[in-house]
Amino acid sequence: MLRSVAVTFFCAAFFVVFSQARTCDVCHLRNLITKDVASPEDWPEQAHCKQYQDASCCSVETAVLIGTDGYDSYYGEEYAWDKCGSLSPECEAWFIHESCFYECDVNAGKFRRDNNCSLEDDSNWKMEGMPMKASQCDSWWAACKNDAFCESSEKDIFGVCDTTSQCKPAKNIYDDAKEFCEVLWDGSFTYSTDEENAYSFWFPEGQRNPNDLIQPTLGFPSQCDSHDPDVTECASPFDLVLEAEIDDLQSLVNKGLGKDENCEICHAQYHHKDTATVTEFPNSTHACAAWSENSCCTVETAAIVHNDELYGEEYRWDRCGALSEKC
C-alpha cells in the first residue's frame, strides 16, 4: 500500500514538474547586459557565478567582469559598492554573490518591480520585495558591518552621496542585518526567517539552484512589450535540468512520506525494516531503546547487535581486546 501511494503521488507530481520544466525561462529583468533566456554557459576559470552555468541569464562576459572596474562601467561609478575604498575580501565576496544572483538567476525576474517595461522609466531592471534567507543576510552583515559605505539620505546604494564626507562603517548606518539587507538595495529584498520559502543569494558550485524550488507556482511578470526574446538557445525538454528536477522531486516525496512517524522509509537495506515503526525492545535500558518509537531495526536485530552474528568477526570493534565500558 505504501509503495502504491508513493508511486501514485510521484507520478502525479512528475506530471506537474514536467509541465513546468525549466527548459526555456525568459529573463525578465532587463538591462543592457541581460540575455534573452536562461541558457547554459561555459564559464572560463576566472569567471564568477559558475553555480549558474547550467541555466544563466548572464553571459560569460558579464560573469568575468563582476567584481572588476569593468563591471562598474555598465552601471556607472555611482553604483559601485566600494565608493569609500576597497572592501574586506569577506565583505566583497557577498557583493559578488548578490551580483551573480541579480545578473544570472532567472528567478530574480519574478520580482521585477512592475510591468511597465520601458527603458525610459527604468522599471524593467528593478526588483522589489524578494524574500531572502535571513541567515544569508546575517552572514553578509557580519562580513560588512565594519566596512565603509557612503550614507546617502535614503541609505541605499543608489542614492547620491559625497564620498569625501559621508563615508562611515556600515554598523553606523544600519541598525542590523535586516535593515542592511532591505534598505541597501532600495527594497529589492526582504529579510525572511521563513527560510524554507526564501531565496538564496548564493549556493555552492555543482549543486542544483535551490531557488528553482522556492514558490514554484509563483509566475513571472508580463513580458516586456519591447522585448522579443530569441529562444533558439532553449534546451531540449529532456535535458539535465529536467533530470535534476526529477531527483529533487523524489527527495521531496521521500521527505513528505517521512513526516508520518509510522511511515518513514528506511533507506539503508541490510538488516533493516522497510519502514521505521514503533518497536518494543526488551527493556528501557537496552542499547537501542532510545529508538523504540521510530526504529528501523527489529527486536531480533537489537538482540544480537553486540555479537558477531550481524556482520562477521572482521567487523568486531574489540578485535584488539576488550574495550573499556565507557568506550
Image (cartoon, helix red, strand yellow):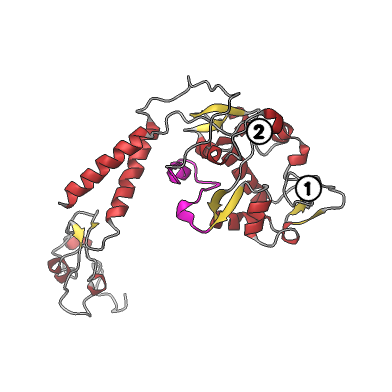
Question: What element does badge 2 sit on?
Answer: helix
Q: Amino acid at mark 2?
A: Leu
Q: Amino acid at mark 1?
A: Gly
Image point 36% across, 44% down: which residue? 248
Task: Pick whichever of labels 2 and 1 is earlier in the sequence.
Answer: 2
User: Would you name the residue on which mark 2 appears?
Assistant: 65
Question: What element does badge 1 sit on?
Answer: loop
Q: Mark yes or no: residue 203 visible.
A: yes
User: Would you name the residue on which mark 1 appears?
Assistant: 85
Q: CA distance from mark 2 to mark 1?
A: 19 Å
Q: Quadrant of residue 122?
A: top right
Image point 58% across, 39% down: which residue? 112
Q: Mark yes or no: residue 142 visible.
A: no
Q: Quadrant of the C terminus?
A: bottom left
* Front residue of this view, candidates 292 and 287: 292
- The magenta stretch is 193-216
Name the chief secondary structure element in magenta. Answer: loop
Q: Position of residue 169 (x, y in %)?
A: 76, 57
